[in-house]
Image (spheres, rainbow, N blue to C red):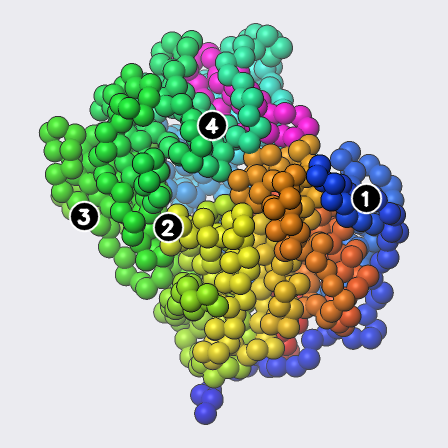
Amino acid sequence: MRMPLPLALAVLMTTTAPSASAADPTPPDVARKPHTVTAPFGASRQDDYYWLRDDAREDKAMLGYLEAENAYADALMAPLRPLQEQLYGEIVGRIKQDDSSVPYRDRGWWYYSRYESGKDYPVHARRKDAAGVDALSIQAANAKGDFNGEQVLLDLNVMAAGKGYFGVDDYEVSPDNRILAWAEDDVGRRQYTIRFRDLETGKDYPDAIPGVSANVVWADDNRTLFYVENDPETLLTVRVKKHVLGTPVAQDVLVYEEEDDSFYMGIGRTRDEKFITIGVESTVSSELRYAPAADPQAFTVLAPRQRDVEYDADHLGGRWVIRTNADGATNFKLATAPSDATSRAQWRDWLAHDPQVFIEGYELFDGFTAIAERSGGLERIRLAKLDGNGGIASQEYVAADEPAYSMGLAANPEPDSPWLRYGYTSLATPATTYELNMATGERRLLKQQPVPGYDPSKYVTERVWIEARDGVKVPVSLVYRQGFVKDGTAPLFQYAYGSYGISMDPGFNGPVVSLLDRGVVYAIAHIRGGQEMGRQWYEDGKLLRKQNTFNDFVDVTRGLVAQGYAAKDRVAAMGGSAGGLLMGAVANQAPGDYRAMVAQVPFVDVVTTMLDASIPLTTNEYDEWGNPEQKPFYDYMLSYSPYDNVAAQAYPALFVGTGLWDSQVQYWEPAKWVAKLRDVNTGTHPVLFRTNMEAGHGGKSGRFRRFREQAEYYAFVLDQLGVREAP
C-alpha cells in the first residue's frame, strides 16, 4: 500500500504525460555527404556527416546547422519556459550571493575568494597576517562587508566585462609577495595567456605569454616564471619554458620538451619550497624532474619512466616521499628516497601496499602525514604520526557520520602547522571545512556552505549495492526527500561517469534539491572505470573491458527499479564528456530502460576521433581507450562507439549539449551523432541539441550563467518524467 507523500510534495507533484505533442516544431535536417574514414590496416567506414567538422569554426553551412538546432531547441522548450525559470530561481536562491571561501595562510598573507551579490565572477583577494587575524575573523569581516585591509588580486567581474566567456584557472604570487602571475582564457578552449601585475603599485606589466596551459611556477629570484607551452593544433602540453620579467617572450628559454605525445605535463614546487618540479604522465607511466628553486638551471630525473610504473613525489624533511604502484602495488604505496635520488633503486618502502585500500594522495607536515585513501568505496583520511626518525609512530582516522559521504584534504599550504584542514560533504550535507589539531585533538568547524532555505533534516542519503550481470557488486549513493516510499512509482535521475579512474563521490549538489523536492530520487552509480573501489575498479572499466562500464550502469538502473526505488518508465540518466560516451552507448544498448537522457559534451565518435592524432587529447589516451590503428582495439571500440552503433530503434528523449569552442570533445561529435539519430530513430520522444556558441568544455563561465543551462535540461527531464507542479 502506498503511503502518502508529505503535504508539500503532494501539492507540488502530479503525474501526467510529457508536454511533447504532434504540434511540436519539426527538427532541422542537414545534408549528407559521403566520406570514407580509413584505418591504417585497411578497414573503412562511411561517415556522411564528417563534413560538419570545421577546425576554424567558420563554415557557414555548419554554423547554420548549429543555429537551426538551437532555434529548434528554443521552440521545443518554449512551453517549459515557466518551469525553467522557476527552476533557475530555486537554484540561484540556494546560493548565498555574497559568500566567500575559507581563507588560508601562506607566506604571511591570508588568501581567499569572495563573491558580491548579483555578480557572476569571484574577487580573489588577500589580507596581511597580524594579531587577531585568522580564518574566522576574515570570514566575519567579509560577511559584514568590511574590506578594510583587503588587497584585491584579481576582480574577474571587471576583467570579464564584455566577454562571452572568461576564466582564470591558475594564479601565483611571487615568493616575495610582490608580483602576481595569472593564466586567463577568454574563449573557453583552454588556451591561456599569462599576465603579470605589480601588487605594490597595482599596475600590470606589458609581458604577455599566449598559447599556454594554466600552470605557472615562480623561481626564488621573483623574476623568473616557469610555464608550459601548448602545441597550437593538438593543445598538448609539449614544452616547459622560463620567462624573465621585462624580457621579450620570443627569447624565453626552453627548459624541457616532451617528445612522447602520449604524456601530459605539469610543473610545481615541492612542499618545502626547495625544488621546482616537472612532472609528465601518461595513463600508465610517469616521470618527475627536479631542480633547486634557488637556482633552477639543471633538472634531475627522480626515476626514469617505465611502462606500467606510475609515481608522484613531494619533498619535506630532507627526503622525497613517493606515491607509486611500483613492484605490484596496484593500489599504490608510499616510499621515501634521499634528496639527490636519481633511480628507483634508492626508494625505500614507507607505507606498505594494501590490496583493500587505495591510496589517492597525501600531504606532508613536519610531525605527521595525512593520507587520502579509499576503502569499501568510500573516502577516508589516515593520519600517520611520525617518530623522531621519520618512521610511523601511530595511525588514526578522521571520523565520518553518514553511510555515504565524501571526505578529502583541503588547502594546507604550511607544513609546520599542527592543524590539518579537510573537507566533508554528502548528498544531504553541504560542503563543510574542518581543521583538526594533531597535538590536542581539537576539531574546529571553519565553515559549512550556506544554502538559504535548505533543511538537511528533510533529506535522507543511503548507500546500496547492486549486483551486476557478472556478479560484481556496484556501490550506489542515493538521496531522496523524507517520506519517500519504495513502492516502485517514483521518478529516478541516475548519474555516472566511469572513465579515467575519476571517482564520482557523493557530495552536496544544490541544484539537485529541486529534483528531490519534486519527489525525484537521485542516484550516483559508482561504476567500473572510476576508482571508487580501488585501482582494479578502474582497470576493469577501460580498454578491452570498457563494456563493463556500460553494463554496470544499466544493471544499477534495473536493480534500483527492481528494489522499488523507481518506476520502470520514469528513469532519467545523465553523463558528461566521457560520461556522455556512457550515455550514448547505453542509449544504443538499452534504450527501453530510460525515458530521458542528458548527454553533455559527449564523447560519442570514439573511433574516428582516436584515429586522428591532430585532435587534442587523442594520443594521450591510447592507454585509456586503445589505439584503433591496431585491429583488436579498432574492432572493440567500434562495437560500442555511440555514433557507429546508432540503429533503427526507439530512443529515449535526449538532451544533448556542447560548446562550439570545446577543445576536449569537439562540437562535431555530438552534432554528427544527433544528425544520425534524426535519420534512423523510430521513436517519438524528442531529441534536443543545444550548442553554446561562446563556450568550451565546461559550458558558460560565471556562477549564474551555467545554471541557466542546468535549469533548461532539468526542465526537459522533469517534463519527460511526467513531473508537474500545481499552478
The amino acid pointed to by label 1 is Thr
Q: Give 478 or 290, whichever is nearer the viewer.
A: 290
The amino acid pointed to by label 4 is Val
Is 335 colored magenta in this rendering? no
Q: Position of residue 96 (x, y in %)?
A: 47, 53
Res 332 visible: no
Q: Which residues are magenta?
A: 213-242
Q: Give 85 or 293, whichever is nearer the viewer.
A: 293
Q: Give 74 or 554, whichever is nearer the viewer.
A: 554
Label 4 sits on a secondary structure element that is strand
Q: Which label sits in the foreground, 2 or 3?
A: 2
Label 1 to label 3, Cα distance in Å?
Answer: 60 Å
Classify mark 1: residues with Cα within 10 Å, few (<14), some (14-19) or many (20+): few
Q: Which label sits in the foreground, 4 or 1?
A: 1
Using residue 693 as the reference point, say whether residue 2 is left or right of it.
left
Q: Position of residue 416 (x, y in %)?
A: 23, 29
Label 2 to label 3, Cα distance in Å?
Answer: 21 Å
Q: Which mark is residue 280?
A: 4
Q: Position of residue 37 (x, y in %)?
A: 77, 43
Identify the residue position indicated by label 3 in the image: 396
Label 2 sits on a secondary structure element that is loop
Measuring 59% from the left and 15% from the top, which residue is drawn there?
A: 207
Identify the residue position indicated by label 2 in the image: 534
